[in-house]
Image: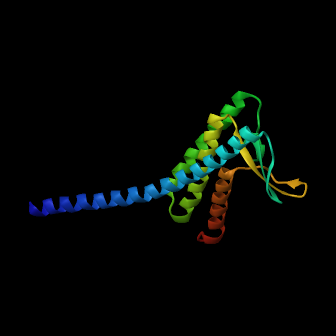
Amino acid sequence: MKNVQFAGKLAKSLVRDIKFKMIKKNYLNFFLILSIFLIDRASKILIINNQKINGNIENTILPFLNFNLIWNEGIAFGLFSFSNNTYYNILTFIIIAITFIILWFIIKTKSFERLGFMMIFGGSLGNIFDRLYYSAVPDFIDIHFNNFHWFIFNVADIFISMGVILLIMLEIFFKKKI
């Protein structure tokens, strides 16, 4: 009987240790995703408030960098911008569904792959928030060379792009070849 009690206590202790490690690991994941979301939100709030105070002014930060607020009703680079609310709502639903799939990948993957998916997820949450709250995503980072301007984007897009680049690099350089 003592062996059974000891085994039960040992199992309880192991389960508690495993749960603690999982919670600790997931807190770090949650903190990273939340940090990405909050950095994105803070940057957009600053730009939106600046426009409310100063009007629609293009702020030159560096010779190749401007902050110029535009409202993107489509997806990346303004693609699929629709004037019809039905199409906008369908597109928003698809984006939310894809974000849940990315969450599933976060749960199922490990190490740097997880980091890539977390960056994509955090950025996606920022843009989804804007789609639901403003019915558009505020983009404001304008990189240019002379008269050639790249697509205007935001901080969430930077994290999404970094996550995608990380996943591509991991796939190309670090996956075991069959």
> Which quadrant holds residue 91?
top right
Residue nearer the viewer, 167 or 36: 36
State how the image is colored.
rainbow
Q: Residue most toward the front? A: 53
Q: Is residue 78 left or right of residue 103?
A: right
Where is residue 14 drawn, in percent x and y?
28, 62
**Residue visible at 53% across and 51% down in the picture:** 34
Where is residue 167 drawn, in percent x and y?
63, 61
Q: Is residue 46 left or right of residue 4?
A: right
Task: Count the numbered circles shown.
Answer: 0
* Image quadrant containing the N terminus: bottom left
**Residue visible at 64% across and 39% down in the picture:** 130
Can the viewer see residue 30? Answer: yes
**Residue visible at 18% across and 62% down in the picture:** 7
Where is residue 54 drawn, in percent x and y?
76, 41
Q: Is residue 37 left or right of residue 50?
A: left
Q: Is residue 168 above or below residue 132?
A: below
**Residue visible at 90% across and 58% down in the picture:** 146
Q: Residue most toward the right? A: 147
Where is residue 43 drawn, in percent x and y?
65, 49
Residue nearer the viewer, 90 or 22: 22
> Which quadrant holds residue 128?
top right
* Image quadrant containing the C terminus: bottom right
